[in-house]
Amino acid sequence: MPIKLVNPVETSFVLEISDKHFETEGDPTKITVRQATQGAKEKRSFIYSEVTNIINQNSQFAAEMQLRQRWSLEELKRMECFLTLVQCNISDTDGTDLFRFKLKGDRQVLDMNENQFKVAWNKLDPIIAAEIHAKVLEVNLDWAGPLGQ
């Protein structure tokens, strides 16, 4: 019988380090992370895709070539979270949900574009962002290698 696709695995976590650090009371801070699909992996790989070859014909050498690559580890972490975060109960300073989600069929998905997510993500304390990213890597082990490669 051929392969029948199933929904990616989703895992829920309590952000225990962040809750302890910020001494939160009441309900714990929770997130849910989805296992990345091939589409998410391709989008993630665009972080590494900006490579520029520069050839200087006027150099004192016959042909001088430079290779430049632009990418940021923190941008990669944010992208990985953007691609896999499907639930989070962190509130913004005004009490609204920092990240928005909606139901799509039988699955919850992020209801923000990449720029909106970036604005929200940039409001996080680095301790919270690091813990969320660590949970993303727990669900997506193939991203957890050296420098996320």
Image: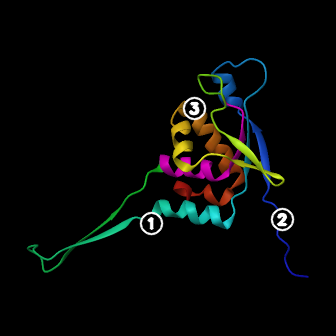
Q: Is residue 54 left or right of residue 133?
A: left
Q: Is residue 102 within the magenta segment?
A: no
Question: Where residue 40 sits in the image (x, y, percent)?
Answer: 63, 61
Is 53 situated above or below 12?
below
Quadrant containing the N terminus is: bottom right
- Percent across and percent down for residue 89 are 72, 32
- For the record, the magenta segment spans 74-90
Badge 3 marks a residue whose secondary structure is helix
Alpha-carbon distance for marks 3 and 2? Answer: 34 Å
- At 51% from the left and 36% from the top, the residue drawn is 122
Quick check: 4 left or right of 131?
right
* Residue labelled with disc 3: 127
Circles 3 and 1: CB distance less than 8 Å?
no
Which picture quadrant has residue 60?
Answer: bottom left
Residue extending farthest to the right is 1
Residue type for callout 1: Ser
Position of 133 relative to 67 (above/below) = above
Q: Identify the residue at image location x=78%, y=19%.
A: 26
Q: Residue flagged by tag 2: what amino acid is it?
A: Val
For residue 6, which numbered disc appears in the image? Answer: 2
Mark 1 or mark 2, which has the lower sequence index?
Answer: 2
Q: Main secondary structure of the magenta part?
A: helix
Find residue 132 and report its horizontal and vertical position in percent.
64, 40
**Sequence-first tag of 3 and 1:** 1
Q: Which residue is mark 1?
A: 49
